[in-house]
Image (spheres, grey):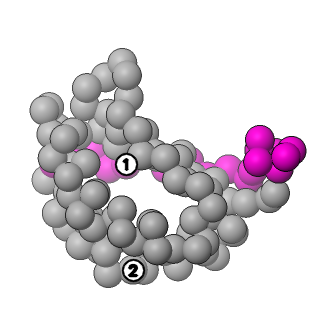
Amino acid sequence: MAGHALFITHRTRPGMRDAVRDVWLRHMAPAVAGNPDHLDYHYCYDLTDGDVLQVFQLYRNADAAGAFLQQPNYAAYLVEVEAMLAVPPDVQAASSQWSKSDSN
């Protein structure tokens, strides 16, 4: 399956990771769960740094990823977490070439 993958790293201000997660759960979890263009999504705590979140998203295509960023939930999330982040998120895009689910 081809797809548009995003690998996102969020560095929070010291001790703010749980607070950012709580905002994500309130705004973004429902939006992601209801979005058929999200083929896969993992919101993870970095195991080596208590102030880092790692996110993997797989969309049907790049247009779907761009459209998702226009949702009101995303705008509300950004406003609420801005002061909790140490730096802007690092976003790396990739083109999925193979996945385990493709081989089943």
Mark 1 element type? loop
- The residue beneath circle 2 is 71
In the image, the segment drawn in magenta is: 84-104
Measured as percent of width and height from the top left, residue 7 is found at 54, 45
Q: Quadrant of residue 77?
A: bottom left
Label 1 vs label 2: CA separation?
Answer: 18 Å
> Label 1 belongs to which residue?
89
Horizontal side of residue 23 vs 52, given as left or right: left
Name which residue lies at 35% across and 34% down: 45
Q: Looking at the image, is 87 positioned above or below residue 33? A: above
Residue at the right extreme?
103
Q: Say which of marks 1 and 2 sits in front.
A: 2
Question: Is residue 102 inside the magenta stretch?
Answer: yes
- At a point 15% along the width and 47% down the height, the residue shown is 19
Amino acid type of the residue that numbered disc 1 sits on in the rendered structure: Pro
Q: Which amino acid does the dot numbered 2 rest on? A: Gln
Residue 103 located left or right of residue 21 = right
